[in-house]
Amino acid sequence: MNKTLALFVGCLLFQLVHAWVQKPCTVNFPVPADTISLGKGMYMYTGRVLMCVPQGGKHVRQVAILLPKLVVNTDTNGVLIPGKQNPVINVTITSPQTPGPNHTMLLYDVTYNNTAFRHNTELKLTAGVYDGQPVNYDYYCDYIIVAKQAK
């Protein structure tokens, strides 16, 4: 089975399992919109996804992105180990509905799960409104991830 088909099947199975056993917020596991080979096993993944409201409240938004298996060096809590080869991410969180900067979402947690899935890496992003007040707007996460694919 080629890698693209394996990734598609893996993502589909993952979404079905999570839709059945997890909170509604964690159901959305988008596959990157674009994958660009940079050579020597390095890839750039880009996309835009609607973030969801977790059970913690409307002042927080989350998204989990399912990627091909990446080289990620984390501790047992999914936190990156400094000085090791790890993915580089650029994230912009926006809402077309917000009336101004008082509702800006700030990224405060990035977690990698490289062990739960055989052929994939889960990247979980969590953001919150800086003043902690609940907001009823839709927020989108635009991301660029540059990483080395695991063999």
Image (cartoon, rainbow, N blue to C red):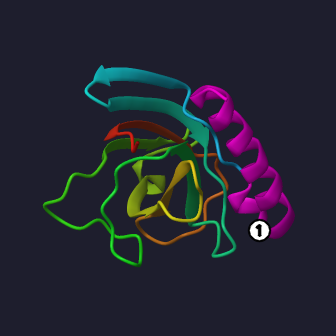
Label count reads 1
Q: Nearer the viewer, residue 103 or 143?
A: 143
What predominant SS class does the magenta segment belong to? helix
Q: How crowded is mark 1: few (under 14 residues within 10 Å), some or many (20 or more)?
A: few
Vertical placement of residue 77 versus 16, above or below: below
Question: Is residue 97 something that shows in the picture?
Answer: yes
* Residue farthest front in this picture: 1
Residue at 77% x, 68% y is: 22
Vertical placement of residue 20 versus 52, above or below: below
Residue at 74% x, 55% y is: 27
Question: Is residue 96 something that shows in the picture?
Answer: no
Quarter of the picture containing the N terminus is top right
Quarter of the picture containing the C terminus is top left
Locate residue 120, reporting x and y percent: 55, 49
Residue at 64% x, 66% y is: 58
Residue type indicated by callout 1: Gln
Q: Which of 148 and 145 is in front in this view?
A: 148
Magenta span contains residue 16 = yes
Locate residue 129, reporting x and y percent: 47, 63
Locate residue 113, reporting x and y percent: 49, 63
Q: Dot 1 corresponds to which residue?
A: 22
Vertical placement of residue 123 versus 21, above or below: above
Residue at 48% x, 46% y is: 69
Magenta range is: 1-27
Classify residue 57 by image quadrant.
Answer: bottom right
Secondary element under disc 1, as helix, strand or loop, is loop
Going by the image, does 73 lie left or right of 53? left
Q: Nearer the viewer, residue 118 or 88?
A: 118
Going by the image, does 136 lie left or right of 120? right
Vertical placement of residue 18 versus 142, above or below: below
Magenta span contains residue 45 = no
